[in-house]
Amino acid sequence: MILVTHLLGTGHLSRAVTLGDAFRQANHDVDIVSGGTPVPNLRTEAIRLHQLPPVKSDGIHFNRLLDSLDQPVDGQFMADRCNCLVSLIGDLRPDVLITELYPFGRRVLKSEFLAALEAAVALPNRPIILASIRDILAPPSTAQKEEDTANLIAEFYDAVLVHSDPAATPLEVSWPVTNALSKKLRYTGYVAPPAPLSHPDKAGQHEVLVTAGGGGVGTQLFETAVKAAKKDRNRHWHLLVGGSDKDASIQKLRQQAGNLSITIEPVRRDFRQMLNHAAVSVSMCGYNTAIDLLQTRTPGVFVPFDLGGEVEQTLRAESLAKRQGYALIPSNTLTPESLLQAVDETIAEGAAETHAQFDGAAETVRIVEQLFEAGL
């Protein structure tokens, strides 16, 4: 069982599904319990997906949760989520319980995660309990948060799965690693779906492909891209817009574009295949986005999400920008001119440099099987 709640973008859930697929391919039964907003076009045929009453963040205010009608949630709503989660654990009695990001993040959901952990350890056969974290975390803002995380790991967790390559991005880059925590770390490599094949129609060929993930952020990036496209007479720009309000966003962007020859449409399921043919990608720098570009070797311009004090994407983009074929533009310096210059420069550099292991999902299965067989 994998417990995951995405609050803004969809990367956390996508990574959980990729892990779930790998466990299913190894003939394990998989239950994913999702507490975020349902995501259309998500391929979950091989797993059992359980949807809790969904919550999302109020923009960048991650401590203020909203329901599906954009109304602040109350205590009863959160209690219903918690009861549903605890009931699922009692009914399904997992052999392995994986919490995605928690306890290194999602502190706003501490009460339900803690209830889930307590329910798990109370089962007749206590499951192996693991945390699953990406390459770079939001560093703890206080010593107390670091201490609370350490205490939870010590009390409940058998190991921490770090979906990164320690030679490239060790956890120490973004989180203090003590001796006690170090003993529980298991590096898996990057969790990625199979590398995308070429698009049968060569969609995206020679285009500037602009995306902002599947969440509702990216307005500044898209509006700047439209202005940059007006100055670029040599290439076609293609914007893929996500989020629950994507229809209104697309209409507004098309009005801003006017008669400009530019494609603005909703996110597509074949986006990863399109990357194989694009001249350059313009995007934020979430975990899944970075992996997509590393796999396809598509040149990339990163405008990392850095509002509300967020540093995770900036740290990742800074690491990638040291390689050939990638550029970083902080959001406070993003202009049509700076974007167009970065696009020109990354295209001129050619195919991006990539040295990484992408079999993190299969390695995760191997590590979990090994832990289970050892009776940990």
Image: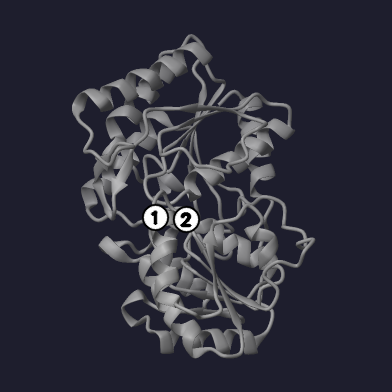
Label 1: state its secondary structure: loop
Please, what is the three-letter code of the amino acid marked with disc 1?
Gly
Residue drawn at x 77%, y 59% as measured from the top left:
197
Label 2: state its secondary structure: loop
Please, what is the three-letter code of the amino acid marked with disc 2?
Gly
> Counting other residues with Cα less than 10 Å from the Cα at mark 1, is it few (<14), some (14-19), or many (20 or more)?
some
Horizontal side of 271 relative to 257 (left or right) equals: right
Q: Quadrant of residue 154?
A: top left
Q: Residue 172, position in %: x, y?
A: 43, 59
Which quadrant is the C terminus positioned in?
Answer: top right
User: Can you see residue 341?
Assistant: no
Q: CA distance from mark 1 to mark 2?
A: 6 Å
Q: Is residue 152 above or below residue 324?
A: above
Say if mark 1 contacts mark 2, CB within 8 Å. yes
Q: Residue 30, position in %: x, y?
A: 61, 27
In depth, the one of 52 and 240 nearer the eye is 240
Mark 2 lies on residue: 242
Residue 216 tag number: 1
Q: Residue 327, position in %: x, y?
A: 51, 80
Horizontal side of 276 relative to 174 (left or right) equals: right
User: Can you see residue 165?
Assistant: yes
Q: Which of marks 2 and 1 precedes in the sequence?
A: 1
Residue 133 tag number: none
